[in-house]
Image (tube, rainbow, N blue to C red):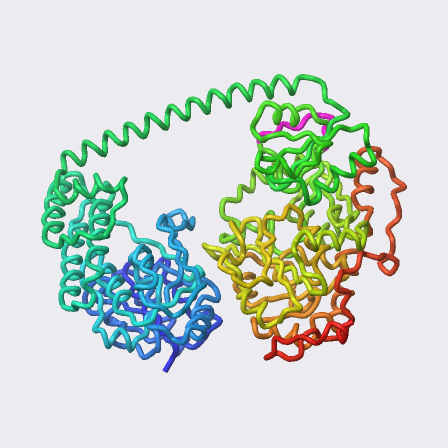
Amino acid sequence: MPRFSVIVPAYKVQAYLHACLESVLSQSCPDLELIPVDDASPDACGAIIDEFAARDPRVRPVRLTRRQGPGPARNAGTSEATGDYLLFLDGADTLTPGALQAVADRLKETGGPDVLVYDQVRVLRSGETVRDETLVPLTEQGPAPFRLEDRPSLLRLPVTPHNHVCRREFVEREGLSFPPGSDEDTPWTYPVLMTAESIATLDRVCVHHRASRKESTSRRPFDVFEQYDRLFAFLDGRPRLARWRPVLFRGMVDHLAAVAARADRLPRVSRAEFLRLARAHCRRHRAPGAPVRLRDRPRHALVRLGLHRTYRALRLAAAVHHQAVKLAVKAAGALRSTVLRLHYRVQLRLPLRRDRAVFCAYGGQGHGCNPGALEQAFRAHAPHIRTAWIAHPEHHHTVPAATRRITPGTAAYWTALARSAYLVDNTGLDRRLVKRPGQTVVQTQHGTPLKHLGLDLRERPAAGAGTDVGALLDTVDTWDYVVSANRHSTLVQERVHPGPYKTLEYGQPRNDVFQQATPADVTRLRETLGVPEGTVAVLYAPTYRDYRRTQRAPLDLDRLASRLGPRFVILARAHRRHGGPLAPESTSPRVIDVTAHPSVESLCLASDALLTDYSSIMFDYAGLDRPIVLHTGDLEAYEAARGTYFDLRSFPPGAVARSEDELIDIFATGHWRGSRSAQLRAAFRRRFCPYDDGRAAERVVRHVVFGEKGLPPVVPLDERHPVPSAAAPLTGSPLIAAPRSATPLPLTDRL
C-alpha cells in the first residue's frame, strides 16, 4: 500500500500534462501511485499518459469512454486508489520539489490526521505565480492535530481540492465524493473540513495551480446554485454540523456576489437571471448568525434581495467614486513628483560638493551594516568629508548625532543624491538616480553570498519573482567600486553583477568591530540584552524562506530552551523580511527576542555561539572564532527554491543538525564546541575571512577617498585576537549531560 495516491484528471491539457506528471514522479518521496484519468480528452493527453505508464510502474492510468468533467473523473481515480492518502491535482498543476516529503514528514509529526492542509499559488497565463488574495496563515504553532472548531479560519481558504490531502479511509467512511458540473470543489472542500476528526496544517507551498479559462458565453456559472443545494443538503443530513450553516451561508453570498461581479465568467445578458436565482437561494438557505463585515453588508443585502439594477448602479457609482479618489490622489502625487523632478534637475546642474558623502542601508533602514561601518570610517579617516544618512523617520534614532539624517523622497534626499561626491549603499540606490561625472558610487553588498542572487535568480522564480534584469544591469553600470570580503564573493559578484566597476577585496567593513571590541563591551552588551551572568547565549538567526507564504521559526524555541537547560539562553533574531518576532508566543524566560535590536554585530559580540541555517551571518560570525551550529532540516526545499553556491553540508563552519532532536544532541554532547567543530570552523574561517582583521573599512576609505596604493597590511589569521565570548567555553567540555536531560553540569566543572 503506497503512502500517497495522486489523482490527476486530464482534459485538453496536453501542453502542461507532461510537466504535471513529471513533477509527481520526480518527488524525493517515491512512496506513491500516480493515477492519471483520461477524461476522453480529444488531444494527446491519452498518449502522454500511456508514455508515462510504460516507463514507470507507479503510473496506473484510468480511461473514461466519454467526457464526464473533473468531479466524476476524480471519483473514478479515487475508486482505483490504494494509498493511505489522496492528493488531487489538475492536469496543468505541478507539485513543488520536495513537497511530498514535506507532507509525509508533517503527517508523521502530527500522528496521521484525516486532513492535512498546505499552501498553493496560482499560475497565470503569463506563467507568473501569484498568491491568493485570501490570506489565512497556515501556522504550525499550537496543538496539532486539531478540529475545525479550533481553527474555523480554515473555511476562508480557497475552496479547492488542490491544497490538502485526505486520508482515504476517512473519505470512504464519510462517503465523500465530487459532484458533476462546474464549481464542483464547493461540495467537496467544506464537507471534508467539517467532518474531519483531525486536521493539521503545513506552512509550505506544495502546489502550483494553473486555473482553467472560463468561457463567458457558457451557462457554467449557474452550476453554482446546484452545488450549494448539494452542500446544504449534506448539512441537513448531518445535524451535528448545523453550527456551520451560518458560516457557509455567508460564504455562499460572498461567492454569488463575486460571480455576479465578474464579466469574464457571467455574460451581462445573464446577470439579471443570475441575481434572481441568487435571491431565491438566499431565501431558501437563509441562516443568520455569522457576522458580516460592515463594508460587505450592502453587497450582501443587494444579492439576497436580488436587486440587480440597484446592484449594478451602486457598483457603477462605487467604481466612479473610487476612480475619482484614485485620480485625485494620483494628481496630487504627480504634482509633487513633478516638483521634485524639477528640483532634482536643477540640483544636477549645480556643482558637486566634494566634501559630502551620503550613505544608505537596506533601502532606508537604520544606521548599520557595511555602509554604517564605512560612514564611521569616513568620519575617522576623512574628517573633512561631511556625512549624511538616508533613512525613514522611524529609523532616524539609530543614526549618530554627528551624521545628518535625510528622509527618502524629500527635496533634501534628491539634493544629496545630485550633489554628493560619494554615494555608499548595500542593496541599490534609487533607480531614478542620474550618476554625474565626478560622483563615486561604492556598493558594499551585505554579506558573503551563499544563496543565489543577481542574474542567477532568473532560474529561480520563487526567489526572483519581480526581478527586473534590465534595471539591475543599469544599476550595476553606476557602480565604481564593489567591496568584497573574500575571493568567493569576488568571483560570484563579478559573474552575477557584471559591470565595469573595480572590486575592493579588502574584507567586510561591518566585521571590524569584532577585532576592535573589548571584554568590557561584551559584558555591557549582555547586560543590556538581559543575558544572565554565567549563562551561554546562543544567537539563533535563521534566514528568510522564499517558498513559504508566512515565515515562522523552523525550531520550537521553547522546547529547545527547555531541553538545553538553565545554563543556556537563546537570543532569537528574525530576518529583516520576516515581518515580526521569531517566537511571538514563546513563554520561556530563556528565549529573548532580539529582532528589533538595531545592530546584529552587537548581538554577535554578546553571544557565545551562533545557531543558523543558510544565513550569511555565518560568514561574519566565523571571524569571531566562536562556535557555529547549522540546522538544515529543509535544505533540499531551500536549494530548490533559492539555490546555493556550494554544498553547505560538505563544507560547514561547524556541527550540522538535520532535525531538532539532532540539534539537541549536538549541544548535549558538547559537539557544538568540540575539536571537530573547531577544525571545521578554522577551515571555513581561512576561506571566507582572510581580510577581516579590523581594518577593512579603513582600507576602503584610504583607497576610495585618497587613492592610496600602499594600504595597511592584512594581519595574518593566526595573529588576530577577536574579543572572546563572556562564557569562554573550553573545547570538548559539555554543558549538559545527556540528550534526554535538561540538567547541566555545575559551572565549576564547565570552567
**Can you give x and y, in whole percent of width and height, for residue 553 in the image?**
53, 60
Residue 438 falls inside the magenta stretch:
yes
Q: Is residue 17 above or below residue 432?
A: below
- Which residue range is magenta in the image? 432-440
Q: Nearer the viewer, residue 186 or 36?
A: 186
Principal SS element in the magenta part? Answer: loop
The residue at 54%/49% (across/down) is: 577
Residue 687: x %, y % from top left? 77, 60
| Total tally of numbered discs in the picture | 0
Can you say whether 500 is above or below 675 in the image?
Answer: above
Q: Is residue 422 visible?
A: no
User: How far across and how far down the image is residue 365, in percent?
Assistant: 60, 40
- Identify the residue shown where x is 35% and y is 65%: 164
| Location of residue 551 in the rendering, given as x and y in whole percent from the top left corner | 49, 56
- Horizontal arrangement in the rendering, residue 35 relative to residue 515 (left or right): left
Q: Is 688 rendered above or below residue 678? A: above
